[in-house]
Image: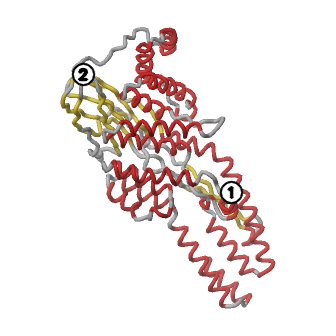
Amino acid sequence: MYHQGVRKLVARNKLSRVLVLSSATIFLSLSLTACTTLGKKAGSMQAELAAGHVGNALAIVEARDLQQKDVLVSLNKGMLRRIKGDYQGSNRVFEVAKQQIEELYGVSVSEQAGALIINDTMRSYSGDRYEQVLLHAYMAMNYIQQDDLDAARVEMLQANVKMQEWGEQPEEDPFVRYLSGIIFETLGEKDQALVAYRQAKDAYKSTMDKQKLNVPAVLKKDLLRSLANEGFNDELRRLKKEFKIKRFKPRALARGYGELVVVLNSGIAPIRKENSIVVNTSGEVVDTVKIAVPSYPQSKQRFHARLVTDHKVSANLEVIEDIDALARAALDAEMPLIITRAIARAVIKHEGQEKVEEKRGALAGFLATVVNIATERADVRSWTTLPQTIQLARVRLPKGKHKVNIEIYNAAGTLVDTIKKEVNIKSRQSSFITEHWLAPNMSLHVVSNK
């Protein structure tokens, strides 16, 4: 239909062949670009990941040159390498992502202008706040898997700086606070662990509107135990009443026993889609404008997990981070500004279309309209290799090698998958399993504890 309109206008206005060919080339280039949006690329990568084809998903992002300084390429590549068990390679790429984010800390005037005239994808993507903070958490978990808790501690300290650098509205992430406490406690820094557990408890309360998560039971016990060990009896009594825990006796790790900490990254984060409308105010081609904004589809099915060991010790894993909810909350918070920019662009483009038609004729006005419609794209970028939720459990086991199962259940309570692991427990020390699970019967048994 567009090409027929172009031929008619060319015949009517008898414009030069050079103008027609140049305009057609622009239109074709923009049309092809629109067909290969970042959203579709992310979708294909996520589809491969959901099917258990991690290597194929990694190949999609590995094909992109890291020198392009694309934060999302680095984030996705780092996460996929982590899922495959390449912790060193994952952190090398995550380190690049950190540097890229720092370089993009200040947004240039030219990028803001491009976003207002063309579309929001003209702005460099440095990650939502929750993504920037979680980057440090995953680097820390990579270091944990390499038995380098000191390096993991450094990442937690950097995450703390990141969470505070937004001034009067710090971005508190309760999971990151909780993970910090676990790492500090494992390193024997009991006072620092207590501070982190307190911060985690407060963060769960302050982010209730985003994640709808209460303070996890496992964190409550960790906080009460730390308070008892440090002798903060007044605060201990107050929190026992607040948590409605009447009987609580802190237990130190007995000789010959150690602790197993299981962190399960479950499912895949939601992927943004584009919602757009095309409006024609008068029936004239040049009065046609398009407005496009991002959105998330309905949340996918949730799964919960249970840890079962060969020592007749079991525990339910608790959801300690709902990334699906965080992503939606971040977009909701940004949406008023997104809509404002989209409307402003529509006005600017419409005025431009009318001026082009007035000065250069109907064909030029038509082509300007086509170009403006083709270039109006929603910004659907996000860290799509993140999990849907993060779940955690802590249990005590006798020292030695153990076989453990992470059982995955659907919302109906049906067992849909089992992840079989082996772990070596050391006396009065913590051992970790940080596993990724994608979908029923597609779990990846790649993360092991040495």
Where in the figure is residue 115, as x and y percent of width and height? 66, 60
- Position of 447 with respect to 20 (left or right) is left
Q: What residue is pinned by disc 2?
A: 257
Neighbour tally class for label 1: few under 14, some 14-19, many 20 plus, Cα within 10 Å: many
Q: Quadrant of residue 348?
A: bottom right
Looking at the image, residue 117 lies above or below residue 397: below
Looking at the image, can residue 1 be seen? no
- Position of 405 with respect to 70 (left or right) is left
Q: In this orientation, which residue lies closer to the viewer: 201 or 208?
A: 201
Looking at the image, residue 253 lies above or below residue 370: above
Give the residue drawn at x 55%, y 67%. 34
* Distance Cα–Cα, label 2 vs label 1: 59 Å
Residue at far right of view: 358
Closer to the chain start, of discs 2 and 1, is 2
- Position of 136 with respect to 249 (left or right) is right
Q: In this orientation, which residue lies closer to the viewer: 107 or 63?
A: 107
Quarter of the image for the C terminus: give it.
Answer: top left
Q: Quadrant of residue 260?
A: top left
Query: Three-letter amino acid code at disc 1?
Result: Ala
**Number of marks drawn:** 2
Quarter of the image for the N terminus: give it.
Answer: bottom right
Looking at the image, can residue 148 be seen? yes
Where in the figure is residue 286, as x and y percent of width and height? 74, 71
Looking at the image, residue 443 lies above or below residue 426: below
Where in the figure is residue 227, as x and y percent of width and height? 45, 15
- Position of 145 with respect to 174 (left or right) is left
Query: Three-letter amino acid code at disc 2?
Result: Tyr
Give the residue drawn at x 80%, y 79%. 359
* SS class, disc 1: helix
Q: What residue is pinned by disc 1?
A: 342
Where in the figure is residue 323, as x and y percent of width and height? 48, 40
